[in-house]
């Protein structure tokens, strides 16, 4: 029996990717990379040789359950876990972990976001297999850490101890010293220069019993809720229990609630061509579709005197662009965004203003 399970977290809206990512159709259900597969489909594809299809679970907002079923038609209904409300990653991971533990108490679980890009997939799979072996052998919480390529202020950072005394025996897993939330530019530069910090990829590997014990140790309020209702998981009573459980769970991330507090956290440094694809600029960085003027185009576009732009528009609409440098041109449904790449952090501001001035039909 294959006791490796995959949990895909697919409930976010991805508002920084507006107008492409919208409340009714977030970015994990889009073909962001222009390869004919949605981010959710690419994520599950990435683990095809690591765990069997029947061991894949997707946690999403209840409003997106049908979308998940459309994109992953081979999943059985019990493999799609619908959250009644968003409560961040800790309740999401608790829900999936308790479901899997009910089915297989000896399960090893991989947790991944649904909307990240990995360019070096073979190396990624090699590292995941190494982490799974370690998690089966040791009572550890493992996370994947990305070697930083720039002092990016958009990621959390993991400080690790890279010496033999702080490695897990027989592995490349290093003891984690600290987690740091998104730093300012000066601190991010210090982290990069020090050489002992990694980007936090939000990807985890552990045994079901180890993460459930960690919930008892660090987030006992969530553990108590799921302990009470664990027997209803996988039964007709599950939805009623989850509605009640989520109303009692705090809104807290797994990083803040558990990973920053636990003393059995190890990180596996990785160089896998990773991006969280959280912003338009990140899509520009990972795309292999650049023309000779460093433009990334997904759509039917003719460009003149234009460089360093990212243009993503409907393929059935011809777009002609002249004289732009360093811009985002993005159209989806009833919204067209034209914005300097250097100002993309304002996209959330634009979304808030549009909702206030034009109503909810545009977000």
Image: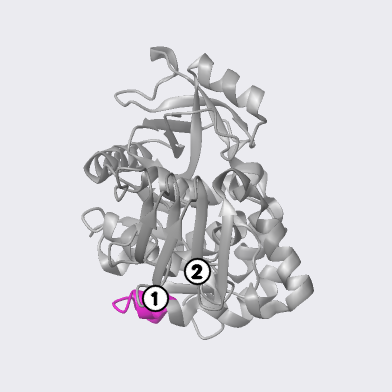
Residue carrying label 2: 331
Query: Furthest residue to the right?
Result: 356
Identify whether 290 is placed above or below 311: above
Identify whether 6 is placed above or below 254: below
Looking at the image, tell me whether mark 1 or mark 2 is earlier in sequence order.
1
- Position of the C terminus, as image quadrant, is bottom right
| Circles 1 and 2: CB atoms closer than 8 Å | yes
State the image quarter where residue 39 is shown: bottom left
Tell me which segment is drawn in magenta. Answer: 68-78
Question: Percent x, y for residue 63?
Answer: 56, 79
Q: What element carries label 2?
A: strand
Q: Can residue 205 be seen in this view?
A: no
Identify whether 187 is placed above or below 232: above
In depth, the one of 150 and 125 nearer the eye is 150
- Position of the N terminus, as image quadrant, is bottom left
Assess whether residue 70 is covered by the magenta stretch.
Answer: yes
In depth, the one of 199 and 285 nearer the eye is 285
Q: What element carries label 1?
A: loop
Residue carrying label 1: 317
């Amino acid at each position: 029996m294959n006791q490796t399970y995959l949990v895909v977290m697919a409930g976010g809206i991805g508002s920084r990717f507006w107008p492409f990512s919208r409340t009714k159709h977030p970015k994990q259900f889009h073909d962001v990379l222009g390869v004919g597969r949605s981010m959710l489909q690419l994520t599950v594809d990435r683990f095809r040789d690591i765990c069997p299809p029947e061991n894949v679970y997707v946690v999403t907002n209840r409003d997106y359950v049908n979308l998940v079923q459309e994109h992953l038609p081979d999943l059985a209904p019990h493999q799609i876990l619908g959250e009644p409300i968003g409560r961040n990653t800790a309740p999401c991971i608790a829900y999936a972990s308790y479901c899997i533990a009910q089915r297989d108490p000896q399960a090893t679980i991989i947790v991944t976001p649904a909307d990240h890009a990995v360019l070096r997939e073979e190396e990624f799979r090699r590292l995941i297999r190494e982490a799974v072996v370690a998690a089966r052998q040791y009572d550890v919480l493992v996370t994947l850490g990305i070697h930083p390529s720039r002092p990016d202020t958009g990621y959390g950072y993991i400080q690790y101890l890279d010496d033999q005394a702080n490695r897990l025996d027989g592995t490349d897993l290093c003891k984690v010293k600290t987690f740091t939330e998104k730093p300012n530019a000066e601190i991010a530069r210090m982290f990069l220069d020090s050489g002992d910090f990694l980007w936090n990829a939000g990807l985890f590997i552990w045994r079901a019993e180890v993460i459930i014990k960690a919930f008892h140790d660090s987030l006992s309020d969530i553990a108590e809720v799921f302990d009470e209702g664990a027997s209803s998981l996988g039964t007709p009573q599950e939805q009623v229990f989850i509605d009640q459980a989520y109303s009692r769970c705090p809104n807290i991330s797994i990083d803040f609630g558990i990973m920053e507090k636990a003393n059995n956290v190890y990180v596996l440094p990785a160089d896998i061509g990773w991006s969280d694809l959280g912003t338009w600029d990140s899509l520009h960085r990972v795309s292999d579709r650049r023309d000779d003027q460093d433009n990334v185009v997904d759509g039917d576009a003719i460009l003149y005197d234009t460089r360093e732009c990212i243009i993503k528009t409907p393929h059935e609409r011809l777009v002609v662009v002249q004289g732009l440098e360093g811009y985002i041109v993005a159209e989806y449904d009833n919204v067209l965004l034209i914005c300097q790449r250097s100002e993309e952090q304002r996209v959330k501001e634009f979304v808030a203003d549009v909702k206030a001035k034009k109503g909810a039909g545009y977000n």
